Amino acid sequence: MQKVLSGRGTMNNHEELIARVHGWHEENEHQKIINALESVPEDERTYDVICLLARAYSNVGQPTDKGQQANYEKATELLKSVETDGLTDPLWYMRMGYALFYLDRPAEALTYLNQCLALDSSNDLALELKATAEKNVERVTMVKPMSLERLAAYFDTHKWTYELTKDNRLNSGFGSNNGFIFRSHMADDVDWALWGTWKPDIPIEKRRAVLDACNEWNNSTRRPKTYIQIQDNGDLWASGETYVYVGAGITDQHLELNLRLFLMTMMDFTKFLTDRFPELVAEKRSE
């Protein structure tokens, strides 16, 4: 006697469908899985069908694909609908943690990844995602002392060139002739100084015009605060600076946000000067 799955399907048909799904999964044909399993009436969907459908939604696109975030949300909705059945299933926890991880919710993902590993410590993907999720959580929650070594490590991660000087400064540069020289140091252990100067030298006869441009910038924008510097040799530099209070420490996330904000606004400032004084861009000061 054939075992009935529901009023309109049989266990044999169910097993054949699951077998096809596993084959499509190995071939990365995730959209075929979605099409096939979505065609199963909701009242005939077993725990296995729903979990495999959730997996397919998580795998159908790359994390950066437009619309993939909605697929991860769909996966979590499907998995939550069978949460009671998945209480002792490590794969249920793994799939929920996977979807949450790629929804950029690492703290929530860790809850499920840890439970998956408690039930099955050999799950390599869960171990990998857990390690990354822990780093992501630490990045936004762990406050650590600010140092130029941390800044240098960020530059290393992005393969940006720099120099650490004997007087505890980090020097670098961004852009070409119309870019800027970048320097950073710790001021009195409580303020992190970010400083940049437009690469072209400014002749003395342009001092008033460039100073007026700096004042115009300062009146219309919040950062960086800009000014004219007179060097020992008489050269004039148009510079900008920002100070970030880090006396209580700073998270990796806020280190990145403050650095990138300064670099972005400093680049805006140098473009502003380049558009205003294109004749000065031909000369490039050495870094």
Image: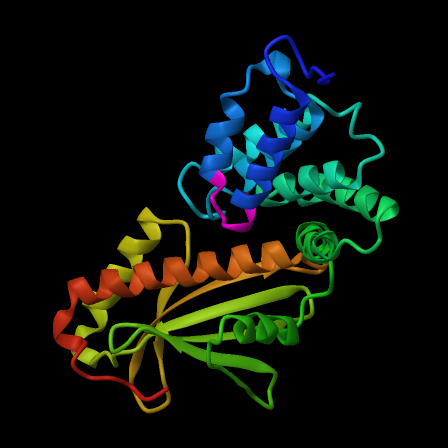
46, above or below 23, in the image: above
59, above or below 275, in the image: above
> Can residue 225 be seen here?
no
Q: Residue at the far left: name it.
A: 279
Query: Picture quarter containing residue 139?
Result: bottom right
Q: Residue at x 52, y 43 (%)?
A: 24
Q: Residue at the far top: name it.
A: 7
Where's the C terminus, which quadrant? bottom left
Residue 29 inside the magenta-drawn segment: yes
In front of the other: 18 or 101: 18
Query: Picture quarter containing residue 18?
Result: top right
258, above or below 64, in the image: below
Q: Residue at the far front: name it.
A: 1
Across and down, in percent, residue 88 comes to 85, 34
Residue 230 inside the magenta-drawn segment: no
> Can residue 133 be seen here?
yes
Query: Picture quarter containing residue 280?
Result: bottom left
In front of the other: 120 or 141: 120
Q: Residue at x 72, y 43 (%)?
A: 94
From the viewer's perspective, tell me whether residue 33 is left or right of residue 240. Answer: right
Across and down, in percent, residue 267 comes to 33, 63
Q: Residue at x 78, y 30 (%)?
A: 86
Q: Which region shows up in magenta?
A: 25-30
